[in-house]
Image: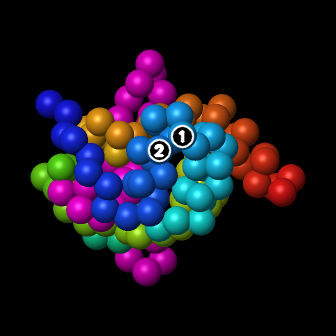
Amino acid sequence: MVEKLIPENDLEDLLVKTQEKQIDFKDFISFFLKSDVSVPSGSEVMPDGSGFTPLLFEKNGIQMLGVFTALSRVNLFKDKAPYCLSMKGNELLSRIPSEVGLVVNPGFNKGFELPPSGLKEIKVRQMDA
């Protein structure tokens, strides 16, 4: 079952507008990179980063990291990932291994997926900016 996402913050407002074609996806990504996102973990994360057990999904043989646009969204997966980190989108992208993709708001009707090649393109554009 897919949960209906009712926007709770500016990032989610822009996500809805982007999916309704009111805002360009590139502009949304720029905002996403500056925004706080919630990254669930199956175990407690220590200050040095150890213990992080990400919420992963598989799509066509590719591991996809689950991330959410609001902390409340993580509750959908609290049985698999009872802990959560908050970080800026650009920090998240810098930490994702090159062979892993991203799925934003899994289980909700408003979200998106980026394969590893899409994340690489965003990282390159960030460096060029």
The residue shown at (72%, 49%) is: 123
Name the colour scheme: rainbow
Other residues around mark 1 within 10 Å, as few (<14) / some (14–19) / many (≥20): few
Left or right relative to 117: residue 82: left
Q: Are marks 1 and 2 in contact (CB under 8 Å)?
A: yes
Q: Nearer the viewer, residue 59 or 53?
A: 59
Q: CA distance from mark 1 to mark 2?
A: 5 Å
- In the image as oriented, which residue stretches furthest toward the top? 60
On residue 61, the disc is: none
Q: Nearer the viewer, residue 112 or 61?
A: 112
Classify the position of the C terminus by image quarter.
bottom right
**Residue 61 visible in the snapshot:** yes
| 65 in the magenta segment | yes
Q: Secondary structure at mark 2?
A: helix
Judging by the rendered image, the residue that carries numbered circle 1 is: 22
In which quadrant of the rendered view does residue 71 lie? bottom left
Residue 69: percent from the left, percent from the top?
A: 39, 56
Identify residue type, mark 1.
Gln
Residue 84: percent from the left, percent from the top?
A: 31, 66
Q: Secondary structure at mark 1?
A: loop
The residue shown at (66%, 43%) is: 26
Classify the position of the N terminus by image quarter.
top left
**What stretch of residues is rendered in magenta?**
46-75
Other residues around mark 2 within 10 Å, as few (<14) / some (14–19) / many (≥20): some
Identify residue type, mark 2.
Lys
Judging by the rendered image, the residue that carries numbered circle 2 is: 17
**Residue 38 visible in the snapshot:** no
Left or right relative to 9: residue 87: right
